[in-house]
Image (cartoon, rainbow, N blue to C red):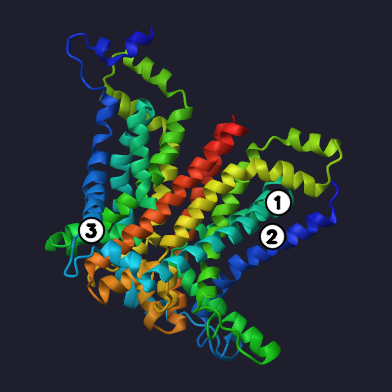
Amino acid sequence: MKRTPLFYGQLLFVLLVCAFMLVPVLMSLLAGLTRNYFQGVMASGMTLDWLNQVWTAYADTIWLSLRLAFACALCVTVIGVPAAYALVRMNNRFSRAFEELMVLPVAMPGLASALALLLTYGQLGGFRSSWLFILVGHVIFTLPFLVRPVMAVMQRQHLPILEEAAASLGAGPLRRFFSVVVPNSRAGILAGVLMVVTLSLGEFNLTWMLHTPMTKTLPVGLADSYASARLEVASAYTVIFLLLIVPLLIALQAVSNHLSRGDRR
Amino acid sequence: MSSLAHPALATPRRHWRLPPAATLALVPALAVLVAFWLLPLARLIALGSERRDGGATAYWQVLSSAQYLSSLAQTCALAVAVTAAALLVGAVVGCFLARQRFFGRSTLVALLTFPLAFPGVVVGFLVILLGGRQGLSASLGMSLFGQRWVFAYSLIGLFVGYLYFSIPRVILTVMAACETLDSSLEEAARSLGASHWRVVVDVIVPGLAPALVSCGAICFATAMGAFGTAFTLGTQLNVTPVAIYNTFTNYANFAMAAALSVVLGAMTWAVLLLARRLIRQTGATL
């Protein structure tokens, strides 16, 4: 294909946008490894001290966030996969209304949802001060991100035929669900789980209102360090966060590529 | 044959009609949503409408206070500006990446879509690295013109931050929508002698319109409710999420915070509904 000047103009624009996306991330990487950012890398040299310092000060926030993300993924899978199945099978006015209801927490500002939860359940001391309070917020917020891809997979496969075959062989509804429906939608479930884990690890708007000093998650710790720590520590902390989240994103992209290739076949 | 699949016939012992098993599968999700979303939301709405000492409800106080109204207007204007800019940039980049094949394309796509999952606080910090007191633009301005360019702690910084996490979403949507465009329409237009611009304006933009409208609505909603970026850049910024936060934590004025959240949520939701109606209309005319 002949490349016109327009092609190169657009390519330049795309590269500029890419630079806008990438340069700050690289700067944060650099700042997190520099001994003194204000003097520059050349003058002060590089160090891993800041990463170490972050690890000693904030390791518990990282563990809490990981625990939260996996618990959230588990909860969302347990309630979301059956819900997706029900929504695909029902496909009537009620199921469409339910889909609307499910997406609403994503459309509402996170702060408002958190406020609503706080004002309703904030009096329950034990629940309020445990990490389960944050978990509830994350489950509500991430539910549609699992249900959507699972529904998409359930809609396109030959699921009704397989289910009919299983039923004709005498399998009950539960048996059909676990041995036919779930295995056949595992790609959608995987994509949804990866998305839920990624979102839960990075959730801030809800979490900032729901957390207590004893239940600080990674983004809450990040906000803390941005407000009070040196630039190098804040950068190092950001780098740790990116190291956690970028592999998840790569996996997510691989899974969704696989899914869309399956679509075309 | 298909009658075998029917649960009522597969188990002939049952004479009464059970609700289909599929409906039962919805119960756990419905219970969680009602208990932890609908119920709290109802409480939030009720709290804002309680009559207080002055006899006015918190909603009325929000809607009659110049301070809150100006913060709502500012938030709205910022969200509109971010949405417009993100749609423009994202549409150009998305179309280019979807329609051209060249070396390094998939790497570019990956790099451009990663920031989608960055939380608002992190984006705020990245904006500080770009435009803060020690940021890139400050040192650039210092070495070129002898003055520091600092924009991070103002509305411009907020705009840049929101743009940062809106662009990847638009790019992804536009790329997906480009795949479904009918390329024969474009070829027909070209063969009839349409210039490049005519093709863009008359064929590509209308084809992408539904995707652009729905994605724009989501960008708008995200920008209305985003709190992390503003929180990192400084709490003196007069946008509504920050105002809600300040009202709640600094003044412990729960009713006012609830009323503000409800108003903000209602505005966001209204825009999402409007976008959906627009899509349905254009879908009907096409």
Chain name for mark 3: B
Q: Residues within 10 Å of mark 3 (few under 14, many from 20)?
A: some
Closer to the camera: disc 3 or disc 2? 3
Mark 2 closeness class: few <14, some 14–19, many ≥20 residues within 10 Å: many
> Which residue is the extreme one toward the front?
B55
Residue B140 image position (x, y, % from top left)? 65, 84
Image quadrant where one finds the N terminus of chain A: top right
Mark 2: amino acid: Val
Q: Earlier in the sequence, mark 3 or mark 1?
A: 3
**Going 33% across and 77% down the picture, which residue do you hit?**
A56
The C terminus of chain A: image quadrant: top right
Disc 3 versus disc 1: distance between alpha carbons?
50 Å
Query: Mark 3 and mark 2: span between their CA atoms?
Result: 49 Å
**Residue annotated with mark 2:** A14
Residue type at the position of mark 1: Phe
Q: Can residue A67 be seen at all in this image of the molecule?
A: no
Residue at mark 3: B49
Q: Secondary structure at mark 1?
A: helix
- Asked if labels 1 and 2 touch by Cβ distance under 8 angstroms, the answer is yes
Instruction: Residue under label 1, please give it.
Output: B96
